[in-house]
Image (tube, grey):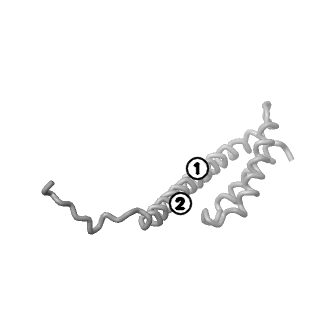
Amino acid sequence: MNRMQAYNDVSLELLHLLQNLPPIKEDDDYLQPMNELLQKREVLLEVIKPPYSEEEKVIGKSVVQLDIKIQQLLQNRKVRISEEMMKIKQSKKVNKAYANSFQAPSLDGTYYDKRN
């Protein structure tokens, strides 16, 4: 198998994995295989150097399209994760404010005399 075909195969496997990811709260099992595929691609990418054969050029064009799709899926996932993190931070803030609201002294029922 030539170097470009190996990269293409790993890219296709990664694309398939990214397209079938579960919701963010359930994706822990997918992180390890995704990281392994990304590392394999990185190693294979270092091996791919010119000159390219005609077959590698044809495969290279499809690999470029795959990389664009993979980048979009990874970017979308990153945005969803950051949104989820913001929701978690917000809920922590609300819970903390709710818990602390009972500890502060209440100003309800306080009488202010305006004569002085």
Of 14 and 2, the residue lying toward us = 14
Q: Which residue is mark 1?
A: 75
Residue that protrudes farthest toward the left in the picture: 115
Q: Amino acid at mark 1?
A: Gln
Residue 115 in picture, x, y percent from top left: 13, 57
Q: Amino acid at mark 2?
A: Ile
Residue at horizontal 59 percent and vertical 52 percent from the top:
78
Residue at horizontal 44 percent and vertical 61 percent from the top:
97
Considering only order in the chain, which callout, 2 or 1, is on the residue closer to the N terminus? 1
Q: Which residue is mark 2?
A: 88
Of 116 and 97, the residue lying toward us = 116
Q: Quadrant of the C terminus?
A: bottom left
Residue at horizontal 51 percent and vertical 55 percent from the top:
86
Residue 14 in picture, x, y percent from top left: 71, 54
Q: Residues within 10 Å of mark 2 (few under 14, many from 20)?
A: few
Of 50 and 36, the residue lying toward us = 36
Residue that protrudes farthest toward the right in the picture: 1
Of 86 and 64, the residue lying toward us = 86
Residue at horizontal 79 percent and vertical 31 percent from the top:
51
As drawn, 21 above or below 69: below
- Left or right, residue 107 beside residue 100: left
Q: Tell me the mark number nearer the camera, choosing from 1 and 2.
A: 2
- Left or right, residue 113 beside residue 92: left
Residue 74 in picture, x, y percent from top left: 62, 51
Residue 10 in picture, x, y percent from top left: 77, 51
Tell me, for residue 97, which label it has, or none: none
